Image (cartoon, rainbow, N blue to C red):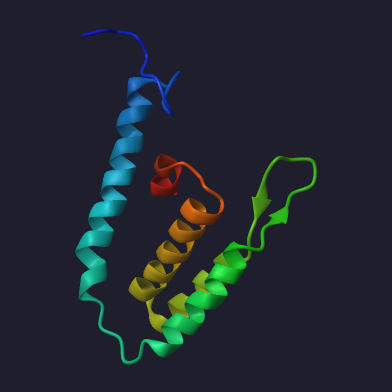
Amino acid sequence: MSDAPPKGPFEGTSLAFRIYYAGIVFAGVWLAVRTFPGVQVESWAPILWWLTFAFAAELSPIPLPGLNAYITVSSALDYAAIVVFGPVVAAMLSTISTVATSLFVRRLSPHKVLFN
């Protein structure tokens, strides 16, 4: 076994950070797998409508001046979805829109998408 740092996205990071990172990703995936399949909704039409707005918000980034970063207004939709649909459906909407736009439009690496 080599003590050389790993190659790839975690190159230059400590073992403690990699363990923390893996724990966060595992906890998020485990919670989604355990929670999302049991969701009961009255009608999927408003959820799909809301998802369309969430995609639009995710795909309309606002650049931050002086930084190589951006923000989106999707968090406002996320908070409103908690009130309208409840926390589990809101989490599903946020997860679907963020994962889809991050992986397929912005083409972020999967390890970044899973952590977020």
Q: Position of residue 83 (x, y in %)?
A: 46, 81
Q: Is residue 84 above or below residue 6?
A: below
Q: Is residue 76 visible?
A: no
Q: Position of residue 75 (x, y in %)?
A: 56, 65
Q: Position of residue 67 (x, y in %)?
A: 73, 40
- The number of numbered badges drawn on the structure is 0
Q: Is residue 57 visible?
A: yes
Please identify the quarter of the rendering in which residue 15 is found: top left
Q: Quadrant of the N terminus?
A: top left
Q: Is residue 59 above or below residue 51?
A: above
Q: Residue furthest right?
A: 65
Q: Is residue 22 above or below residue 37?
A: above
Residue at horizontal 30 percent and vertical 37 percent from the top: 22
69 on left or right of 30 = right
Please identify the quarter of the rendering in which residue 100 is found: bottom left
Nearest to the observer: residue 19 or residue 53? 53
Q: Is residue 103 above or below residue 111?
A: below
Residue at horizontal 41 percent and vertical 73 percent from the top: 90
Nearest to the observer: residue 7 or residue 93? 7
Q: Position of residue 48 (x, y in %)?
A: 44, 81
Residue at horizontal 38 percent and vertical 48 percent from the top: 114
